[in-house]
Image (cartoon, rainbow, N blue to C red):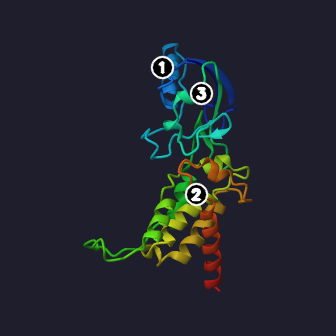
Amino acid sequence: MKIKLTVWRQRNRNAQGAFKDYEVEASPDMSFLEMFDVLNESLISKGEEPVAFDHDCREGICGACSMVINGSPHGPRQGTTTCQLHMRSFQDGDHIVVEPWRARAFPIIKDLVVDRSSFDRIQQAGGYITVNTGAPQDANAIPIGKAEADEAFDYAACIGCGACVAACPNASAMLFTASKVAHLSLLPQGAPERRDRVRRMVTAMDGEGFGGCTNHGECSAACPKEIGQDAITLLNREFMRAGVSAK
């Protein structure tokens, strides 16, 4: 299948970027990233600079494969990361436009690669629990109800890819922050820092320059792990409780 690509090219964060057109011969069985590998091999053979894009596991686990494909973070399929998107989702002759995440808090490093270290700083602000050093506890030492464990696991599924920010018209990081706050606040291990955690993480989020949430719902629609907006409701509740307890 022949694909026409329009790809954002930008040498560094201070350079002027622009779209550039390419044509690629791809197999329907290729992943989207494998199609970019073919493109880059062709560019290298011509003495041109390959397109820089982020990737690591290519198994839908790490969230590194950040691309906006035809206006949708990670592409047209719901619950799917870019690396797990296959070319059979497109038709022969399709025109595909590929851009990086676009948010002030995610400055472009090169081409399709952005700096998402702001997420790391939000998590470092409070995304941890206090544990005693020494021998680990027995598995059944802290009983946790199945409903609570399942809910916490759903929020912990967040891979920190940033699709929620890229999809939000306000470039809000509320869904990411909410997921990190939620999965710890629901478990007894996260109880000691519960109030301080949400205050620190929300403060860090605001300090990074992310926009505010206005309930568009684009974040959940774009999330490859399909985390719902109820996480944001939980974050708001935790933040309000922390504010009351601090008075």
Mark 1 vs mark 2: give the one in front: 2
Q: Quadrant of the C terminus?
A: bottom right
Query: From the viewer's perspective, is residue 116 above or below residue 67?
Result: below
Q: Secondary structure at mark 1?
A: helix
Q: Secondary structure at mark 2?
A: helix
Q: Answer whether residue 2 is visible to the viewer in this image.
A: yes
Residue under numbered circle 1: 41
State the image quarter where residue 202 is shown: bottom right
Residue under numbered circle 2: 176
Amino acid, disc 1: Glu
**In the image, 6: left or right of 179?**
right
Mark 3 vs mark 2: give the one in front: 3
Mark 3 nearby-residue class (10 Å; few <14, some 14–19, many ≥20): some
Q: Position of residue 184 (x, y in %)?
A: 48, 69
| Residue positioned most to the top | 46
Q: Secondary structure at mark 3?
A: loop
Marks 3 and 2 sit apart, C-alpha to C-alpha, by: 29 Å
Query: How many numbered discs?
Result: 3
